[in-house]
Image (cartoon, rainbow, N blue to C red):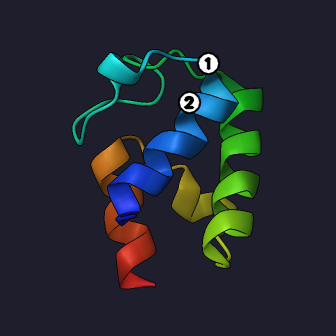
């Protein structure tokens, strides 16, 4: 399973959004309906699933699915 597919599964589990709404350019807040609590839970889920640490100031910059994937693959 590639990074996009793994991130998509995490988004589906944590945001309850529609699979059709998730693409590389999807904005977490505007397109997927994430609120501040969702963002915190998403950050924790990504850290756990990818065995990485995402600093709070970094996660604030990760506003799209593509940005999250780039961050994970670069770490």
Label for residue 56? none
- In percent of width and height, residue 34 lies at 58, 22
| Label 1, label 2: how far apart the Cα atoms are | 5 Å
Quarter holding the N terminus is bottom left
Residue 56 seen in the current view: yes
Q: Label 2 near label 1: C-beta < 8 Å?
A: yes
Most foreground residue, 52 or 16 = 16
The answer to whether 9 is drawn above or below residue 21 in the figure is below
Residue 37, image x and y in percent? 77, 29
- Residue pointed to by mark 2: 12
Q: Secondary structure at mark 2?
A: helix
| Residue at the image position 74 percent from the left and 66 percent from the top | 48
Mark 2: give few (<14), some (14-19) or many (20+) Cα within 10 Å: some
Residue 10: image x %, image y %? 59, 44
Compared with residue 57, is residue 75 higher up or lower down, i.e. above or below?
below
Give the residue number, with chain letter if any, for mark 1. 16
Residue 61 seen by the camera = no
Q: In this image, 40 relative to 24: left or right? A: right
Quadrant position of residue 67: bottom left
Report the number of discs.
2
Quarter location, residue 53: bottom right
Q: Which residue appears farthest toward the bottom when viewing the image?
A: 75
Q: Which residue is the extreme one toward the left?
A: 25
Circle 1 crowding by C-alpha within 10 Å: few under 14, some 14–19, many from 20: few
Query: Secondary structure under badge 1?
Result: loop
Residue 30: image x %, image y %? 40, 17
Residue beneath the point at 48% across and 55% down: 6
Image quadrant in which you'd find residue 56: bottom right
57 or 36: nearer the viewer: 36
Foreground pick, 14 / 19: 19
């Amino acid at each position: 399973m590639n990074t996009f597919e793994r991130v998509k599964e995490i988004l589906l589990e944590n945001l309850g959004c529609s699979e059709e709404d998730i693409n590389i350019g999807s904005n977490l807040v505007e397109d997927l309906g994430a609120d501040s609590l969702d963002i915190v839970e998403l950050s924790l889920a990504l850290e756990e699933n990818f065995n990485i640490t995402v600093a709070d100031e970094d996660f604030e910059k990760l506003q799209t699915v593509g940005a999250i994937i780039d961050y994970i693959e670069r770490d």
